[in-house]
Image: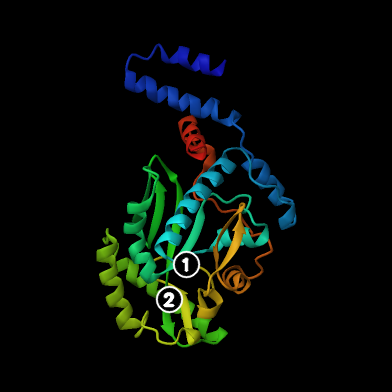
Amino acid sequence: MKKLFINFVCLFVPSQMRRDRLRKNLHTKFIRNSVAYELKDLSDLFKMSLAVDKIPPASGILRDIQLCTLKILKEVDRICREENIKYWLSFGSLLGAVRSGKYIPWDDDIDISMLRDDYKKFVRVFNEKTTYKNLKAVFWSKKKYRIIKIVNQDIPFLFIDIFPCDVKEGKMSLKEKFKFSSDLQNMAVKFNKKNVKSKTLTSYDYKYERYYTETIPGVNIVKNFDEATIFYGIDFLHYWNCIAFDYKDIFPLKEIEFEGSKFFAPANSEIYLTCIYGDYMKLPDVLHYHFNIKKLSLEDMLKIKQFRDL
C-alpha cells in the first residue's frame, strides 16, 4: 500500500527528474524501515553488557553486507594465492576470526594487511586478474589517510581496506615498541599534512620512500628477518598504542577459519590482537561503523542483495 501511495503522489509532479527524486526520498523514508534490519536491536543488546559470545550475529541487510565483503575477500585470497602475494586478516576481521570464526556481529567491512612490496604491486595485479567487472582496487587518498581499497564500483560502501606494513632491522623491547609506535603516529601527522595532493600510488611511493629513508634509515632493507621488527606504515594514521611487532609474530603466516573458509592470519594472532586492542575478548566502549546503514536507499539494498547472490 505504501508503494502504491508513493507512486500515486508522484504522478502529480510535472518534472521527471523531480518525480524520480521525490519517489526515491519517499521510498527511503517510509519503506526502508520495514526491511529486515536488526542494528538497533544489536545496539540495545550491546548496552546490556552481554558477554562477547552472547551477542547475536548480524542479520538483515547488515548480514547481506557482510556476505558481500566476504565475497570480495575470497576473490582477493584467490588472486593472492595465484600470484604469491602475502596478506593477513587484520584488526576487526582478525578479531572476529579468533573470537568465533565469524564476523564481529556489528562489523561492516574487512581489513587485511600486506608488506610494502606486495602492497605496491597489488593494485595492478588485482585489476588484471579479477573476474568481477564491478570490483576495482584503487589508491584511496583522503586527508590523513592513504590506503588501498578494493571497491564495488556499483556499491561504493562495499569494500576491503588494505594496510601496508614496513620492516626494519633489529628487535625491540616492549618499551621501545610503544615509543616507536608513538613516533610513527607523529610522523604520520607531519607526512600526510604535506602530501595530501598525492593522487596516485606511484607519486605517493616516491615521496613516502624518500621521507622514510631520511627518518628511518634502512627501512625495508633487512638481512636478518629473525631479528626484525614489522610495523604499520605512516600512510594511515593509526591510533593504537602499539603498531610494531616482532617479525616472527606475523610470519610465517598461518591459515585461520573465517566464515567457513580458510584465510591467512599472523603467526601469533594473540600477540597481534593484544598489541592492538589490549584485552581483545572484551567488548569495546562503543560500536564503530563506517557509514550509517539506516540511510541506505531501497535501490542500495537491492544492489547489495544482487551482488550477494552472484
Q: Residue at x 44, y 64 (%)?
A: 163
Q: Residue at x 50, y 52 (%)?
A: 74
User: In the rendered structure, which amino acid carries the disc numbered 2?
Assistant: Leu
From where the camera sits, is residue 240 visible? yes
Residue 216 point in image, percent of width and height: 36, 83
Residue 278 point in image, percent of width and height: 63, 71
> In the rendered view, does 273 fall on the left or right side of 21?
right
Residue 257 point in image, percent of width and height: 62, 59
What numbered label is drawn on residue 74? Answer: none
Residues 102 and 62: in front is 102
The residue that mark 1 highlights is: 238
> In the rendered view, does 204 fall on the left or right side of 259?
left
From where the camera sits, is residue 242 visible? no
Residues 213 and 270: in front is 270
The residue that mark 2 highlights is: 184
Q: How is the image coloured?
A: rainbow
- Mark 1, secondary structure of its residue: loop
Residue contact at pointers 2 and 1, CB within 8 angstroms: yes
User: In the rendered structure, which amino acid carries the disc numbered 1?
Assistant: His
Q: Counting residues from the N terminus, which is met first, the one under dot 2 or under dot 1?
A: 2
Residues 66 and 241: in front is 66
The alpha-carbon separation of the residues under discs 2 and 1 comes to 9 Å
Quarter of the image that includes the N terminus? top right
